[in-house]
Image (cartoon, rainbow, N blue to C red):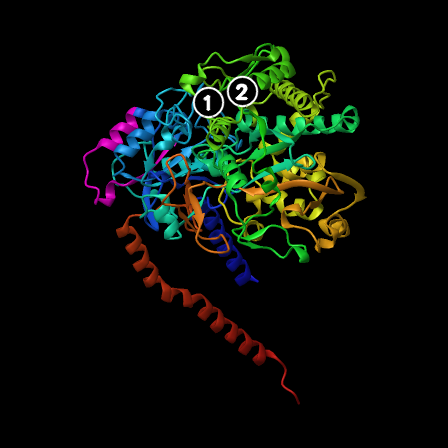
Amino acid sequence: VRAAVVVAALAGGVFGSLEKMRPFEKRCFSGAQPMDDVAPCVMMLSAEGSLGCAQCADELDAPLVYLTAIEELDLFLRRNTSEADQNYLRVVMIPLSLFVNPQATLLMQEYPGRVAAALVDISSTGQGTENPIPYPPVESFSPASPYPNRQYTTTPNSTYAWNPFATAIDQRILPFNMFFVNGTVATELRTLSFRFLESRFSEEVTFPRQIIQSRGQMWSCAANTSKQCLDESTCLPVGSHSVYSIVGDVPPGREVISVSAPFDSNAFVHNNFAYGATNEAIAAAALLVAAESFYSYRASAGASLPLRRTPVFLLFDTEAYGFAGSKRFLHDVQNFTCEVELDISAGLIGCRVPYMPSLQFTKLKDKTWTVDIDVAQLGNAALNGDLSGSYYLHMLNETEDDAFVREQIMAAFGAILTDSSVNSAQVGLPPITSQAFELAFEGRVPAAFIGDFDAEFRNPYYHAMFDNITELSENQFEAACSVARGLSQSLIRLAYADYETAATVNCSLVSELLDCLVGNFTDCSLAQQFLDDNTYAVLAPDTASTNYAFNFQPLPITTNTQVEWVAKAAFLESFVGYYNAINQTRIRCSTFQDCVPVALEANNNFSRINAEDALNVQCFNHECVVTNSWFHPAYGTAIISRNEDSSLFTVDEQANAQQPAWTESLWDSDLGFCSFTQDSYSYQVSILLIGLALWPLCGIFPLMHWILARKARKRESEELPKPV
């Protein structure tokens, strides 16, 4: 018993000491996936070069230094030291308030020799916070350029500045890893680091010290352009899939009208923080509400009227990267040729070589396109609640057709819309999707853009991490609903020539849709409602709030590896697919398998139809619907496949400068960093030697226990009475 008490006391002391050592244990934080602990800046490439962040070594260890002022950072980076001297390498942690100073990244780009890696505390105060959504420490900040995507527009040489809040820091390349950490992680790192330092900024090599180990190499470090990294298979095209939805059919002689919106966004750390709440997401929400409104009209007043023009709803991915989604779609409409079709008799729809989920879009080839009405940047108008004259109509040409379209749109939107004062003939259209229509149709199709700005952007956080759900309010919801009403009214006037009936709009949908697009997708009740049970169960847990375009792979590959890449697109397709359905069968379903008989019937058992006539049957809104709503690849038109499976790519050497070729580097699966306490090397050696010296003593206690136990047993045996 006495021995047990002694052992318990010793064990308690040992484990108590171990508990005190836990803060100094090595802890690792992953940044390989959008929903991991930290958010990494990664390397991007185009036909012109590279930008972003790129560590080109497997691992880099260095002490952590915390700098809060631009003067401290300047002094630290400019110190004249040898780049080969590892004693002067540091992992630099800065608060968000310093990161938004464009001088900070400029200094780190010009003087990177002392930086092993960089950490940014995204809590605005730098004091730590549980909120994972960055809150702006400044009134305006945009990492984008003054004329975003300028080289891909009709005016590639323009010096006009559309974005007055531009810092252009996303055009720089930093030769080290940069991680954005939440306030909780940042506070822990600072606490451990300051424990050993009298001040937060010290050049002395003292021990013990807190070490940060930056992990994860960018695979495209040796590449200079997208072509080089694609040929070396160290990167993937930026982009996933757009969504198009054709209302009914496109018979010969009928014109086409389209409404379009982007649903991808961008940010300096796009894999995690490209929300685009008041920029792209609110435009996508307005388009979806317009689709529901137009459906209500078709089911009521429009049911007795002939359809004069076929409406097409277009939700484009990868618009932030050279309008890649819209350019790819319009290019394919005019030029796509299927070399190897899938076996339509077996119910396999689309094209195998080159990959294409459906050929329905080919029905739009050579059609007369009356107009495309594009919407984006809707959330910074009428913040005081007064919508009069809050939105602007931008159109480039002034033909007779343009005048007719302008008249109908202005009448549909009413007092909230005014003509832009910008001389489009001189300046050109803003950098939005309408640019793709102007280039694709060479000005033959009126391209109308509606946004909340006239001569320059009004979004102070254009393509910044701060354009998130915290920027949305009832005023924005009301404004988006008004735009949705204008879109629906425009379609009623142009598709049915109905100039009397007023569109009815379900405004409550706006906030619900934005909760899905920039909020927590797991809690998105509309996604749960419109997606079939199996799809929702797969998508919901792993889909981040970011609206970055991610990377392109054909759907069969994506759905088996990175299904979250198409989560938002799947939701958008289910929503517009239901409301634009050719036939809402009223047959209830939980999964697509419940709709297989409907698919066989709708497509004549797939036995005697052409691939371009194959209809899409899905389980949307828990109902089997026959619809012309499909995915479409959304990556740069300068990128072409170099194998039959469309899983390997290269850059077309015949592509012109207005064709985007954006790619994202692949990286090591352990991308992130570790934190641990490091003692001096002499101290570590001393501890090792003492440990080795004490090791033999470890056997004394069990030996003594064995000897004492043996003596006790011997004594007990001697005291026992001997048998007679």
The answer to whether one can see residue 519 in this image is no
Frontmost residue, 139 versus 614: 614
**Compared to 43, does 134 lie above or below?**
above
In-image side of 96 versus 114 (left or right): right
Residue neighbourhood size for the residue with mark 2, other residues' Cα within 10 Å, grouped as few (<14), some (14–19), many (≥20): many
Q: Residue at coordinates 25% horizontally, 34% vertically from top-left?
A: 111
> Residue 310, image x and y in percent?
66, 31
Label 1 amino acid? Answer: Pro
The answer to whether one can see residue 427 in this image is yes
Q: Are marks 1 and 2 in contact (CB under 8 Å)?
A: yes
Mark seen at residue 671: none
- In the picture of the structure, the residue carrying the numbered disc 1 is 430
Asked if residue 38 lies in the magenta stretch, the reply is: no
Please give the range of residues in magenta: 71-94
> Residue 316, image x and y in percent?
55, 35
Looking at the image, is mark 1 or mark 2 earlier in the sequence?
1
Q: Secondary structure at mark 2?
A: strand
- In the picture of the structure, the residue carrying the numbered disc 2 is 451
Q: Pick out the residue farthest to the front.
A: 253
Q: Secondary structure at mark 1?
A: loop
Frontmost residue, 511 versus 115: 511
Distance in Å between CA atoms under marks 1 and 2: 10 Å
Q: Quadrant of the N terminus?
A: bottom right
